[in-house]
Amino acid sequence: MSKKTAKPPAKKSSSKQPPKKPAKTQAKSAAKKKPKQPGRKGPTLAESADKFALYQRSVQSPTVDIEFFDAEFQKHRGRVPLSVREDFCGTALFSAEWCKSDARRTALGVDLDGPTLEWGRTNTFAAAPPDAVERVTLAQADVRDTSLPAVDLIVAMNFSYCIFKTREELRGYFAAARKNLVDDGVFALEVYGGTEAVVELSDERELRGGLTYVWEQEKFNPINHHTLCHITWKFRDGSQLYRAFTYDWRLWTLPELGELLREAGFSEVKFYFERVEADEDDDEYLTGTGEFVEHTEIENQEAWLGYVVALK
Ligand SMILES: C[S@@+](CC[C@H](N)C(=O)[O-])C[C@H]1O[C@@H](n2cnc3c(N)ncnc32)[C@H](O)[C@@H]1O
């Protein structure tokens, strides 16, 4: 099994700490920022940056996800999952990693946006072994399209299903996904929440190379749980990619997700949360271990990340 990539630390003190997007690196590995160089010629770091490459580096950790899905699928279904559909696949990083993880595996990445898929074909695929990439298919389609081929596992990572803002829309998506699963298929969603998921805030996390990832919750409406969030990157030369990505979401609660999955016909719904441990350097912090454990009850926390797993 490949080494698990740690997800970001959750702070256990009561000071302000937002829900975190999954990360490959810990905040503590940050390099010191250098001041902006006055009179510097040429493009700024922000001008020469690629937002999709930054996104993959900052919020995706597909090897951790795949290790979890593999183990859970085998536990519940007694066999290895081979075909996956990555919904809202964007640049198809998960799909490429899935096919790298086993020579028998295939992936179907589904996304509405042609240019984003094209970036994945040019860049994500170039970084993966050709024999793995040959087993990835990309479809420019709506994830609710039921004419897509049936697969063992469907995943919706990084909360993208939150674009569906009504119960009817979300139930419709879940029912369509269920229809496109084989008889013993599994559907998995990535979830986030906690008391700080429902407030307006901006949280910075330092990455290697003097790069800072900023997760901003600009608005949250308690009446309908609509939330407007952005990702910004700040660079060591003082430049920034301001609000490079914006998310206009409904933040669904776990009971709502469980109810809608059952209403869509799934037989069982399970909730998994990351096991955390005291940070080696600072016991004010809890560090994610990359290990996800099923729970029916959890402590009410400031920030949590998890998976919802639904069995057909
Ligand atoms: C936040 S990105 C997800 C990137 C990646 N899957 C991840 O794990 O981080 C959301 C993507 O969902 C796509 N999208 C939004 N609505 C969609 C729909 N109804 N069907 C398919 N793709 C959709 C957008 O084009 C965008 O590329």
Image: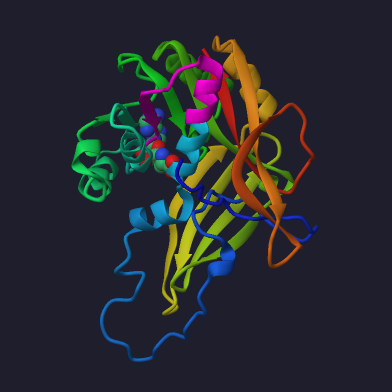
Q: Position of residue 70 (x, y in %)?
A: 47, 29
Left/right of residue 278 with respect to residue 238 in the rendered view:
right
Going 53% across and 71% down the picture, which residue do you hit?
Answer: 30
Task: State the image coordinates of residue 143 (x, y, percent, origin top left).
Answer: 38, 25
Depicted 9 relative to depicted 144: above or below: below
Q: Quadrant of residue 269?
A: top right
In this rendering, position of residue 186 left or right of residue 38: right
Q: Is residue 77 above or below residue 248?
A: above
Give the image quarter of residue 81.
Answer: top left
Q: Is residue 284 above or below residue 304?
A: below
Query: Does the segment drawn in magenta span residue 87?
Result: yes
At horizontal 47% and vertical 86% (from top left) the residue drawn is: 35
Q: Is residue 63 above or below residue 77?
A: below
Decide if residue 65 is in sight here: yes
Q: Classify the position of ligand 1 by quadrant: top left, top right, bottom left or bottom right.
A: top left
Q: Which residues are magenta?
A: 70-89
| Most foreground residue, 148 or 230 | 148
Residue at image coords 43%, 15%: 176
Q: Where in the figure is residue 148, as x and y percent of width and height?
A: 31, 18
Depth check: give the residue in front, 139 or 79.
Answer: 79
* Residue 1 percent coordinates (x, y): 46, 40
